[in-house]
């Protein structure tokens, strides 16, 4: 029998784990001692819990959330894609779009369109280049873009455990 | 805000891994620790670094259903104030105003169909929301946490 990878094993998380995750979503730079005090637990317990969630893959990584609009990527765009499905060619081929570095998100969806892409580009010319790149791909039948005018909430702000 | 190559390198590295020790980072980027510290302070102060956060695997929790929901909004006087609280709902991953056929795109994470129905009802009862269009997300090929354009721009391994 194939041995299960650690991340496939079911993991039981309790409310303390959720509080820790919620905390780390907001700030992962706080020293353990201070964090333990704020959560009202022993530092050793905290270290142990965090380790458990890191090794099991619940915590994927620690990352600085970058505001890319401040790094010259001024345009934020949603691109809906209609996929050409014939024979063996299907949704999975969308994976190849991953190599386009401007793409932030690639989701396969139900509905009139087959995929939703979100990209960040520097300017209109850059957007045109990206749309051409996507359109040139053999699985892409057509695209429709809309400019993001404002962002009320970004995925970096998503923290569902804050409310649990 | 003007960012030079060094700033971008720092951002690219920290987006990959923010737990890296500053000593290691300064060695990797071949800059003096003091310069790094100064740059970091600048990037944080100017808001290029929004925060340092753990990236979680949400498929491991009971929030397995992901949906795209487009809203059409009646832009009567004061619509923004009426609409904005919806972005605060805990199910909302992102909430963006877009051009085109629809006015808002919401990406949401939910427990199941009942939860989705409940969530939709909350959106639909909002005074300025005139229509919702929902699509389910079947699969994903790239998540925002895999996105790091500066890294590719600078070709850091």
Image (cartoon, rainbow, N blue to C red):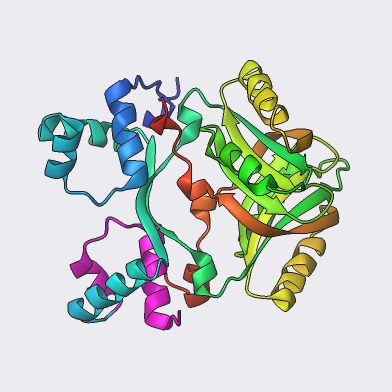
Residue A126 within the segment the image draws in magenta: no
Residue B72 position, x and y percent, is: 78, 42
Q: Is residue A9 left or right of residue B114?
A: left
Task: Find the magenta span and give its range.
Answer: B1-29
Residue at 72%, 70% (x, y): give it: A127
Dividing the picture into quarters, in which one does residue B42 lie? bottom left
Q: Is residue A77 left or right of residue A24?
A: right
Residue B149 visible to the viewer: no
Q: Give x and y (percent) for residue B153.
A: 52, 75
Q: Nearer the viewer, residue A33 or A4?
A: A33
Q: Main secondary structure of the magenta part?
A: helix
In magenta segment, residue B18: yes
Q: Is residue B73 left or right of residue B153?
A: right
Looking at the image, which is closer to me, B28 or B110? B110
Q: Is residue B90 visible?
A: yes
The image position of residue B51, as x and y in percent, is 36, 55
Residue located farthest toward the front when viewing the structure as drawn = B77
Residue positioned 68% across, 31% down in the render: B123
The residue lying at 58 percent from left, 50 percent from top is A152
Residue pushed farthest top? Answer: B114
Image quadrant occupied by the N terminus of chain B: bottom left
* B55 lies left or right of A129: left
């Amino acid at each position: 029998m194939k041995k299960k990878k650690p991340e496939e094993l079911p993991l039981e998380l309790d409310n303390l784990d959720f509080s820790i995750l919620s905390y780390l979503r907001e700030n992962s730079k706080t020293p353990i001692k201070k964090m333990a005090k704020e959560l009202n637990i022993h530092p050793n317990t905290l270290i142990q819990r965090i380790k458990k969630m890191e090794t099991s893959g619940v915590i994927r990584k620690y990352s600085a959330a970058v505001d890319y609009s401040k790094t010259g990527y001024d345009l934020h765009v949603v691109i809906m894609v209609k996929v050409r499905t014939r024979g063996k060619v299907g949704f999975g081929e969308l994976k190849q779009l991953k190599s386009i570095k401007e793409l932030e998100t690639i989701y396969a969806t139900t509905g009139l369109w087959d995929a939703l892409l979100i990209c960040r580009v520097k300017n209109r010319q850059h957007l045109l280049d990206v749309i051409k790149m996507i359109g040139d791909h053999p699985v892409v039948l057509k695209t429709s873009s809309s400019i993001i005018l404002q962002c009320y909430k970004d995925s970096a702000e998503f923290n569902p455990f804050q409310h649990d | 805000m003007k960012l030079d190559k060094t700033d971008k390198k720092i951002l690219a590295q920290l987006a990959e891994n923010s737990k890296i020790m500053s000593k290691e980072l300064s060695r990797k980027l071949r800059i003096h620790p003091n310069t790094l510290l100064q740059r970091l302070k600048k990037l944080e102060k100017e808001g290029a670094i929004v925060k340092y956060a753990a990236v979680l695997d949400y498929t491991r929790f009971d929030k397995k259903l992901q949906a795209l929901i487009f809203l059409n909004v009646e832009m009567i006087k004061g619509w923004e104030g009426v609409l904005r609280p919806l972005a605060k709902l805990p199910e909302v991953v992102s909430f963006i105003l877009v051009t085109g056929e629809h006015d808002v795109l919401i990406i949401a994470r939910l427990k199941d169909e009942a939860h989705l129905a409940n969530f939709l009802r909350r959106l639909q009862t909002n005074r300025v929301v005139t229509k919702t269009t929902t699509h389910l997300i079947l699969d994903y090929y790239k998540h925002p946490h895999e996105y790091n354009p500066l890294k590719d721009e600078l070709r850091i391994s």
